[in-house]
Image (spheres, helix red, strand yellow):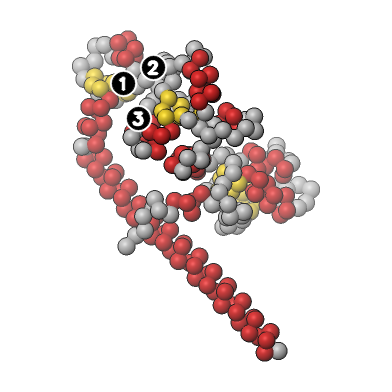
Amino acid sequence: MAMSVKEDIDDLLICTICLETFKEPKYLPCLHTFCKSCINTYIGSTVKGNNPNGFKCPVCRRSVPIDENDEKPENWANNLPSNHFILSLIDRKAIQKSEKLCDTCKLENISQNAHSFCTVCEEAYCESCQRCHKLYKITRAHKIVLIKDIKADSAVSGLFAYVTCKEHPDKTIEVYCQDHSKPCCTVCATVHHRKCEHVVTIDKAVIGIKESEKAKNLMTKLTETSNTLGEVLQNHKTNKENFENGIETVLQEIISLRKSL
């Protein structure tokens, strides 16, 4: 049976160099991810010569080309793209364990537990920073979700479904124009879609999408992919256990040989 992906999601958050939870995760073209400091140290220790043109991935050994204008290897790690997917998983895990810290306070090297999460800024705030966030005109209308509600999963749908309008950042997406296949806020609906015949609420649009044949096929493919990923994680865990057991066996044999000598 395929292992639950959720149970082994922690394996995806571990850097294969330092074997700790990612800090500032950066990914390579091969999609392998490492801590920024780890890959920076790796580059510094492996790149030699006066005119280096890249380095190899520590895992798969695939060549990573570097821009010709970026001559200093010490800058390469900083210029690698950040893995925002991994960052979101780490944030989610921290929130579930009540370990999420205020993002604003962290900039001042202050450790303060987060009290709420802004779905627009995608940042967590302590009570003090949340009050300040609400004072500014530009952020006053942002949707704030309490950390305790996220932990209880009572606000997860609202957390990820809350999207602001690109034309009117202070307005949220509330309706969907089926004539133009476009989600929009109430202002856009009034101005640009007033003559459209099929403008429905987001809730009704979502129900229609979920019941469509295309959505059902997508869910089937996602389930199959999830099962495959579960099997990959199970194999990874099994191989890791076999490797560790093999090391232990070899060490015991070495000890026995030393005693016999």
Q: Badge 3 is on which residue?
A: 158
**Nearer the observer, 46 or 123:** 123
Crowd band around label 3 with a 10 angstrom C-alpha radius: few (<14), some (14–19), many (20+): some
Residue lying at 32% horizontally and 14% vertically, measured from the top left: 186
Under mark 1, the amino acid is Glu
Q: Are marks 2 and 1 in contact (CB under 8 Å)?
A: yes
Crowd band around label 1 with a 10 angstrom C-alpha radius: few (<14), some (14–19), many (20+): some
Q: Badge 1 is on which residue?
A: 174
Under mark 3, the amino acid is Gly
Under mark 2, the amino acid is Lys
How far across and down, in percent of the image, does residue 253 sit?
A: 61, 82
Labels 3 and 1: the sequence-earlier one = 3
> From the viewer's perspective, is residue 152 above or below residue 52?
above
Quadrant of the image containing the N terminus: bottom left
Residue 72 visible to the viewer: yes
Quadrant of the image containing the C terminus: bottom right
Q: Badge 2 is on which residue?
A: 171
How far across and down, in percent of the image, does residue 72 sit?
A: 74, 41
Distance (Cα) linking label 3 and label 1 = 12 Å
Q: Residue 217 lies in what quarter of the image?
A: top left
Q: Residue 150 lies in what quarter of the image?
A: top left
Q: Viewed as shown, does residue 85 lie left or right of 77?
A: left
